[in-house]
Image: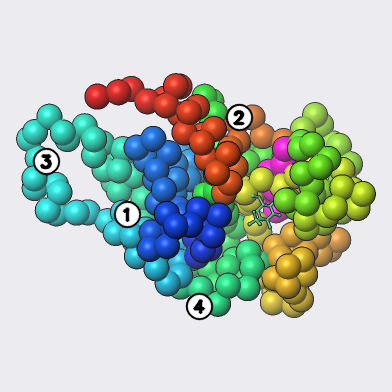
Amino acid sequence: MISKCLFPVAGYGTRFLPATKSMPKEMLPVVNKPLVQYGVEEAIEAGMTTCAMVTGRGKRAIADHFDISYELEHQIAGSGKEKYLESIRNVLEQGVFTMVRQREMKGLGHAILTGQVLTGNEPFGVLLSDDLCLNDGPGVLAQMVELYKQFRCSIVAIQEVPPEETHKYGVIAGGCLKPGIYSVEQMVEKPAPEDAPSNLAIIGRYILTPDIFDILRETEAGANGEIQLTDALQEQARRGCVMAYKFRGRRFDCGSVPGFVEATNFVYENYYSGD
Ligand code: G1P
């Protein structure tokens, strides 16, 4: 149904310096798996087997991670250590990886526009790997694909946040159609608490219909002087419809050190099976 997922992975990861000086932040491990691999596994589970990476300078390790390492395969073949390669082998068997470089950092909207060459003229997923989402049932993107089948329009994942945190997110307001499903009327990128239309914050999972590209091309720089996806989505909602979906599962803000540590402890306690 939706076969491609876009991964904007060009960001600098300044909050994790010096760790991210020569290593992409998306390769930081949560226990023993790089952050971006959790995202790729979630996309593949949702049927999005083409993972389209919008990369940048200094991000080659991501391309290498999603390729075979012959030397490693050769070294480990037939030994008790093969189990450590299991998850990445599964990913490589099921996924196809395409890449384009974003040459200038002009915001999430600009990154999505850069990815158009990879996604083409069809609906696609977007996954921001900083937001690690874990659920014992279907993953967030798989849940959103189900919703897409009903509504056939762009969908954003949302979560309630404390009012004092709205300035970190895109925030939506809209009519509640069913519990957890909203028809978006308003969207604001990183509002101060007094300007926020609600406490429903956008989390880094989207399904976008391809008309978003024409809108993005016309979108002027907004918050932080960047081309904001949120602004383009607001326009898409005005012209037609955008839905917001309160997903099932836990989300960790791995773009911040406390969120990253919290995710690490959670994965270690709940998913790590040991040696
Ligand atoms: C981006 C989006 C924002 C969204 C957030 C989710 O912001 O612009 O609307 O709420 O991701 O993580 P960023 O965190 O890249 O500044």
Which residue of the protein is positioned furthest toward the right in this rendering? 194
Q: CA distance from mark 3 to mark 2?
A: 35 Å
Q: Tell how many labels.
A: 4
Query: In the rendered structure, which amino acid carries the disc numbered 1?
Result: Phe
Q: For the point 57% across and 49% down, which residue is it?
A: 255
Q: Nearer the viewer, mark 2 or mark 4?
A: 4
Q: Is residue 3 magenta?
A: no
Which amino acid, by three-letter code, is at mark 2?
A: Gly
User: Quick one: label 1 or label 3, which is nearer the N terminus?
Assistant: 1
Residue on which the image places disc 1 = 66
- SS class, disc 1: loop
Q: Nearer the viewer, residue 183 or 75?
A: 75
- Give the CA separation, mark 4 to mark 1: 21 Å
Instruction: Assess whether mark 3 and mark 1 are in contact (beta carbons under 8 angstroms).
Output: no
- Mark 3 lies on a secondary structure that is helix
Question: Are there few (<14), some (14-19), or many (20+) residues within 10 Å of tag 4?
Answer: few
Quadrant holding the C terminus = top left
Q: Is residue 6 visible?
A: no
Asked if the residue at tag 1 contacts the one at tag 4, i.e. Cβ–Cβ closer than 8 Å, the answer is no
Of the image marks 3 and 2, the number of the one nearer the N terminus? 3
Q: Is residue 238 left or right of residue 53?
A: right
Q: Nearer the viewer, mark 1 or mark 3?
A: 3
Q: Which numbered dot is residue 89?
A: none
Q: How far apart, in angstroms, are the residues tagged by discs 2 and 4?
A: 34 Å
Q: Which residue is mark 3?
A: 76
Residue position marked by numbered label 4 in the rendering: 103
Give x and y (percent) for residue 75: 8, 45
Q: Measure the C-alpha gap from mark 1 to mark 3.
A: 18 Å
In the figure, 136 relative to 112: above or below? above
